[in-house]
Image: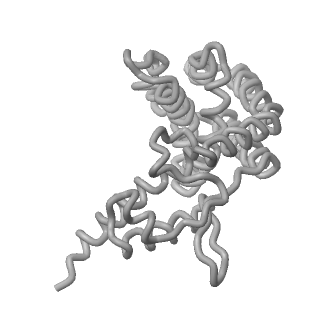
Amino acid sequence: MRDTDGDISKVDTAYTKLKDLIIHYDLIPDSKIRVLPGEHLHIDDLSDRVKASATPVRQALERLQGEGLIDSIPKRGFFARVPNASELQDLYEFARLVLEHNITRPLDPSSVARLGRGLMKVEAVPAGHSATKCVKHHAIAIESVFEQITQMSRNEQMLRMMRNFNDRSRYVRCLSLLQSFDPGAQVRECLEVIEFLRNQDPKGACARLETHMVRMIVDLPELIREARSRWTMAAAI
């Protein structure tokens, strides 16, 4: 009898490991396992990198392709996506619309009261973290704010779309934080959105959110240029 639960668990494990590689690119410190943009994703090679068999790796790749995190070319296979400034701008505009929709709609007081739980000290990075680990920590904190605001809609499809945005924009978010003199400032800025909502000030929340999103959109072309330089150096190692 087939162990269905075991098969699902193996696919989920492979999916989680592969997603971490393909959304962080050169930010993965181990050059032997990291995936760079445009790379041909050979199943046997990936199986070695994530210590999984070929079948769950293939199924994980199909799942990642369905989420828009990698590309699939007929008769050629799977390829890591090359981040594009124009596409990312569209994603940021979409995320901004979703968040503003949730901020400005009638809010359930109990939902607002739950906002920010577990996040108020998130900008305090554990001691001993490397710069890369710090920015990942901060990036996930920002994404958590976006997800908590989206959850107020109680719309699971909307929440899935916001999580997909977070995955697809994770690399440029980390790169932006790496270039910042104070990475925690962006986290605090997003936490202020929640504070405005707790104080029943949706206009203030929208203004703070707009500041964050517009700055990211304006910076995208330069971030992609910096990213291409990093990818070239990483490929040469």
Instruction: Say whether residue 15 is left or right of residue 208.
Output: left
Q: Is residue 194 above or below residue 49?
A: above
Q: Is residue 20 visible?
A: no
Q: Is residue 165 above or below residue 108?
A: below
The image quadrant of residue 45 is: bottom left
Query: Could you tell me which residue is drawn at 59 percent across and 41 percent down?
Result: 170
User: How many marks are shown on the rendered structure?
Assistant: 0
Q: Position of residue 6 (x, y in %)?
A: 23, 69
Instruction: Say whether residue 185 is left or right of residue 51.
Output: right
Q: Is residue 171 above or below residue 63?
A: above
Q: Position of residue 151 (x, y in %)?
A: 52, 42
Q: Which of 146/136 is in front? A: 136
Q: Position of residue 137 (x, y in %)?
A: 47, 29
Q: Position of residue 101 (x, y in %)?
A: 69, 41
Please identify the quadrant where the N terminus is shown.
bottom left
**Colour style of the rendered protein structure:** one colour
Query: Could you tell me which residue is drawn at 51 percent across and 32 percent down?
Result: 136
The image quadrant of residue 122 is: top left
Q: Is residue 30 visible?
A: yes
**Given the current orientation, which residue lies at the most extreme left position?**
1
Query: Could you tell me which residue is drawn at 79 percent across and 46 percent down?
Result: 85
Query: Could you tell me which residue is drawn at 29 percent across and 64 percent down?
Result: 9
Q: Is residue 79 above or below residue 4?
A: above
The image quadrant of residue 143 is: top right
